[in-house]
Image (cartoon, rainbow, N blue to C red):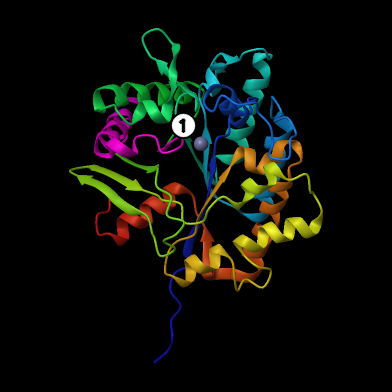
Amino acid sequence: MRQTRGAPVPIALLVDDPCPLVHVFKEHWVHVHRRAPATRDGRPLLDTVPNSFLDRFCDVVDARGIAGKFSIVPVPAGKGDVVRGIDGYDPALTQQWLETARRRLSRRFDFCPEGLTHDLAVDLPTGTLLPVGENEWSQTQDRTTLTPYLTRALELLRRAGFDCTGITSPWVFGIAVEPEYQAAIIAAQRTVYRRDVSWYFLHMRHNAPGTRPWVAVAEGPVRLVAIASTVKDVWWETIDSPRTDATWIRAVADQLLTADGRDGAIRRVLDAGGWPVLLTHWQSLFSNGLETGLRVLDEVGRRVEHTLGDEVTWSTCTEVMQRTLVEAGTPA
Ligand SMILES: [Zn+2]
C-alpha cells in the first residue's frame, strides 16, 4: 500500500505585546512590579521601541513566509491610545506605525487586542487607571464587566482600521473565570464586528507538546476556538544578555529547532502530534534595542523552511481556527 503523507501541520507565531512606541515591558516594572526597569545584567530598559523596528520585523517575516497573530495593545500602559496617539510623541508616528502594520502584516497575520493597557486596569466610566494590574483585576470579574472592557479594546482597534479576528489575554487574563471570559469575548466580537466565529489565546501548554487548538464553545452559530501556545518564548533570554554574536544566536535558535531540524521544541511538538504554536513577545524580539531576538527569528524561519519543508505550513490564527473547526466536526 502506498504511503501517503498527511497534510502539512500548521505552524504559527504568536507575537504578544506590540504597540506603537511604548516599550510595554519596561512600563510593567514601573506600575505592576514596582521595581526599577532594568535587564538582569543591569542595563536600563529603553523607554521606546522605534517605528523602524516594526519595518525590520516585517522584513524578516516576509522573507521567511512566517504567519500567525500580531497583538496590538490599544492603550499601551495608559499612555495615550491607538486612535489619538501616544502621549509625548507626534500623533503622526503612531499613525505611521499602524499604517505599516496594516499594510505589511494583514496578509499573513491576524490582529487582536491584548488588554487595554497591558498594565494597570482602566476604570471605563472615567478612563482613569485603577491601582491594580489587568491580570489581577480580571480574575474576579464576570461577563458584565469583562464584556465592556473587551468591547472597548476591540472598538479602539476597529477605529484605528483593524479587523480583529480574536483576542489575546495579557498575562493569564480571565483564567480564573474562563467561562465568563469566553462569554465576554463572544459578546464583544458580536457587538464590534458582528462576528460569531473567533479565537482567543490564553493557555500555555509548553509541557504538553501533543496539544492542538480546541473548540472551546460551539453553540448555534457561535464558535470560539482556544489556541494554546505549545512552544515557549525562548527569545526572552535575549532581553537579559548583551551578547549579539552568531554563536549565541544559533544557540538560542537551537532550543526551537536545531540546524538539522532533528531536535528542539518545534521538533518535539511535531513528534508528539501537536501543532507548533510559537509564543514570542515584542520585547523578546527587540532585545532592549539589540534586536538579537529578531535575528533568532530570522534563523528559525530559515531552518523551518529548509529542514521541515512540507511537513509544516505557516498559518494565520484564522487558518488555525478554521482547520480546528473542520477537524472537530463543528465547521462554522
Ligand atoms: Zn502580553
Report the residue at 50% width, 54% height from top: 315
Is 83 situated left or right of 198 in this image?
Answer: right
- Name the spot of residue 194 as percent of width and height, x first: 31, 30
In front here: 187 or 194?
187
Secondary structure, mark 1, is strand
Q: Which residues are magenta?
A: 166-195
Is 282 situated left or right of 294 in this image?
Answer: left
Residue 167 included in the magenta stretch of the image:
yes
Residue at far top of view = 126
Above or below for 141 versus 282: above
Residue 184 included in the magenta stretch of the image:
yes
Residue 57 visible at all: no
Q: Main secondary structure of the magenta part?
A: helix
Above or below for 294 versus 167: below
Figure quadrant of the N terminus: bottom left
Quarter of the image for residue 192 reads top left
- Name the spot of residue 293 as percent of width and height, x first: 69, 47
Under mark 1, the amino acid is Pro
Quarter of the image for residue 250 reads bottom right
Report the residue at 68% width, 61% height from top: 302
- Name the spot of residue 311 as percent of width and height, x first: 52, 70
Residue holding disc 1: 113
Quarter of the image for residue 289 reads top right
- Name the spot of residue 93 as percent of width and height, x first: 68, 20
Is 225 situated left or right of 14 in this image?
Answer: left
Report the residue at 39% width, 29% height from top: 136
In front here: 152 or 280?
280
Report the residue at 24% width, 54% height from top: 330
